[in-house]
Image (cartoon, helix red, strand yellow):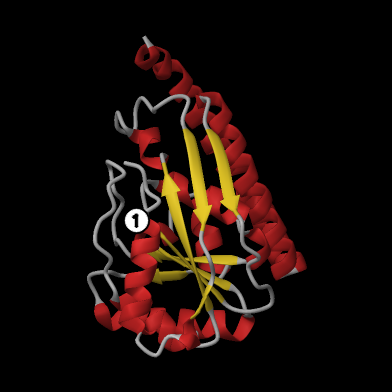
Amino acid sequence: MLKLLSYPLTAIYYLCFFLTLVIFHPIQWICFNLFGYQAHKLSVDALQYSLMLCGYILGTRFSCINEYDIPKDTPIIFVANHQSLHDIYPLTWFMRKHHPKFISKIELGKGIPSVSYNLRHGGAALIDRKNPRQSLPALMKFGEYIETNKRAAVIFPEGTRSKTGKPKPFQTKGLEMLFKKIPSAYVVPVSINNSWKMLKYGKYPMGLGNHVTFTIHKPLKVSTFANKEELINSIETTITNSIHS
């Protein structure tokens, strides 16, 4: 019965979600081109919050559990597991004070209203996973940008989304590059739960009544770990221990 109800609600959700992206596309353009970075960021923050509101149509709630004081005015590297695209806009909203910037596949840099524009102009790294000659320099440049501007990088080291919620082993090369290029950063592990359930039936219909949670763990200073492999293992263990598949 619940799945049957999700068919019309999903149609309404997708319409609202798409209209939100379309409406905010020109708003972003105006803010960026006429008023600069800060105005553009405010428009992006409003976009993320509006996308979260769309989730109410499906009975979805988003919560952030954070018992730690994340340092400000210093580079941050948010490291999280990845369950669906619905990880991204809530995490951007909850961590908006730290100016989160994502590492994204290059295909998303065009064709998607609002999303592609923000990726191209908001400080994200667009990488071609099949082309190391493009991806490595792009990742290096991204790390230097985060270090210089004291912003936050967001990386999903699993590489691909977990469709069942069960975490996949971390791929370490991206993290190692960020540690090298952002030496003054704090690493903040993030455990994401229940995002995958929004797509448990596939893209249509969507799951109803889910509570998506983001658990923020203790920030770790990169420079205090001489052994970066030990740091990565610690991050992965911390994240996976708080994932409930």
Q: Secondary structure at mark 1?
A: helix
> Neighbour class for label 1 at 10 Å: few (<14), some, many (≥20)?
many
Q: Amino acid at mark 1?
A: Thr
Vertical order, 115 against 40 (above or below): above
Q: Quadrant of the N terminus?
A: top left
Q: Quadrant of residue 197?
A: top left
Residue 9 point in image, percent of width and height: 47, 20
Q: Does any portion of residue 24 appear in the rendered image?
A: yes
Residue 60 point in image, percent of width and height: 52, 31
Q: Quadrant of the C terminus?
A: top left
Q: Is residue 50 left or right of residue 8?
A: right
Report the front residue among 15 and 3: 3
Kindly give the residue lying farthest to the top in the view shown.
1
Report the front residue among 65 and 21: 65
Residue indicated by mark 1: 240
Q: Quadrant of residue 146?
A: bottom right
Q: Residue at x 48, y 39 (%)?
A: 212
Residue 124 point in image, percent of width and height: 50, 69
Vertical order, 29 against 23 (above or below): below
Q: Does any portion of residue 114 appear in the rendered image?
A: no
Residue 148 point in image, percent of width and height: 60, 86
Vertical order, 158 against 194 (above or below): below
Q: Residue at x 31, y 51 (%)?
A: 161
